[in-house]
Amino acid sequence: MKPIGGYFELELAAGNEYYTSLIRLNTGRNALEYILRVQKYSLIYIPFYTCDVLLEPIKKTGINFKYYYIDENLDPLIDFTIDSSHCFLYTNYFGIKQQTVKRLSKELNNLIVDNCQAFFSPPLYGIDTFYSCRKFFGVPDGAYLQLNSEIKLDIEKDISYNRCSHLLKRIDIGAEAGYVDFIENNRRLENNPIKLMSNLTRRLLSNINYELCRQKRNENFYYLHQYLKKYNCFDFDLDLAANDAPMIYPLLTTRPDLKKKLIEKKIFVATYWPNVLNWIESNRFEYCLTQNLISLPVDHRYSSKELQVIVDLIKAEIDG
């Protein structure tokens, strides 16, 4: 029986999560490990252009792996045969590649979709698909998994209260003050066992206005694209009604110094992913992406007012 009375807990609205029927886990990388342990593949194909944390579940399960390349549309270059005991992981890059996911689901067996950058892209029927929550929302951890199997692992529930200091500090004393804690939280998530999503993370995820978040991301993406497409080496042909709220606006330029200038103006843009520079030849497209891609924020915290600051700064730097 729960205690009655005493001090109050953090006040959170009693809403609903976005994915109520999927398996709730602690991290995206552990969702991939869950798939590999249940499906028992002998080999997995993964893209060169990915985060090195993807190797963590692969090494933990001992599965063999091979890399593949992507083309300039972020589509996979498949010049090999995928055997029945093998699987193929494709990343829904930046949340703008749902059409490729749909095509691959019809062409490939044993497809695994990494939707960590595409929270709002719905999983396709019968396709193993996993999501990471903290790339889209202010939560310490959390992942969702659609698994094409009746087998379920017997795992315990995670605890998250000790991973929230960066979230609280950002509200109270600013983003820069909480950055060290943010890095420490990332470290704490390394090599964790597969666990169910914590009570705290579930409550936090039940407190979000998802429709507002989805709508704002689409609006903000289109706003940036309207003003920056002439500077963008990506040739987008997008229908965001189908692509479901991108994670960022990917601006590919020939100005690698632009990222540093944005950060100096406190426009914080991540690099996806530095490890790729050590994995691949410098003449490959993935190398160019890692060096030159600028991941501009489009999330629900911002309106056209903040985005115009970004646009003005970029135009001033490029146009002189």
Image (spheres, rainbow, N blue to C red):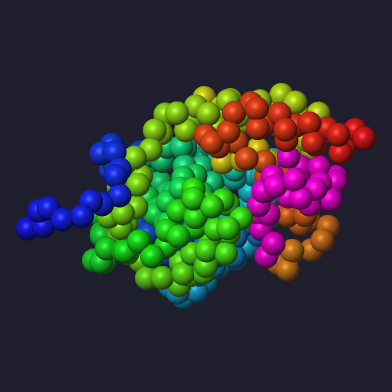
Note whether residue 302 is visible: yes
Q: Nearer the viewer, residue 238 or 169?
A: 169
Name, please, the residue furthest toward the right. 320
The location of residue 228, given as percent across then percent down, is 76, 30
Residue visible at 52% across and 67% down in the picture: 184
- In reply to whether residue 258 is colored magenta, the answer given is yes
User: Main SS of the magenta segment?
Assistant: loop
Note whether residue 99 is visible: no
The location of residue 290, given as percent across then percent down, is 73, 54
Residue visible at 60% across and 36% down in the picture: 298
**Image position of 77 (left or right of 128):** right
Q: Is residue 187 above or below residue 142?
A: below
Q: Quadrant of the N terminus?
A: bottom left
Q: Is residue 212 above or below residue 147?
A: above
Q: Nearer the viewer, residue 5 or 140?
A: 5
**Image position of 308 (left or right of 282):** left
Q: Is residue 33 above or below residue 94?
A: below
**Image position of 253 (left or right of 210):** right
Which corner quadrant of the image does residue 231 belong to? top right
Residue visible at 67% across and 65% down in the picture: 275
The location of residue 229, given as percent across then percent down, is 76, 29
The magenta segment: 251-275
Residue visible at 59% across and 28% down in the picture: 303
Q: Quadrant of the C terminus?
A: top right
The location of residue 4, given as percent across then percent down, is 9, 53
Q: Nearer the viewer, residue 163 or 117?
A: 163
- In reply to whether residue 60 is colored magenta, the answer given is no
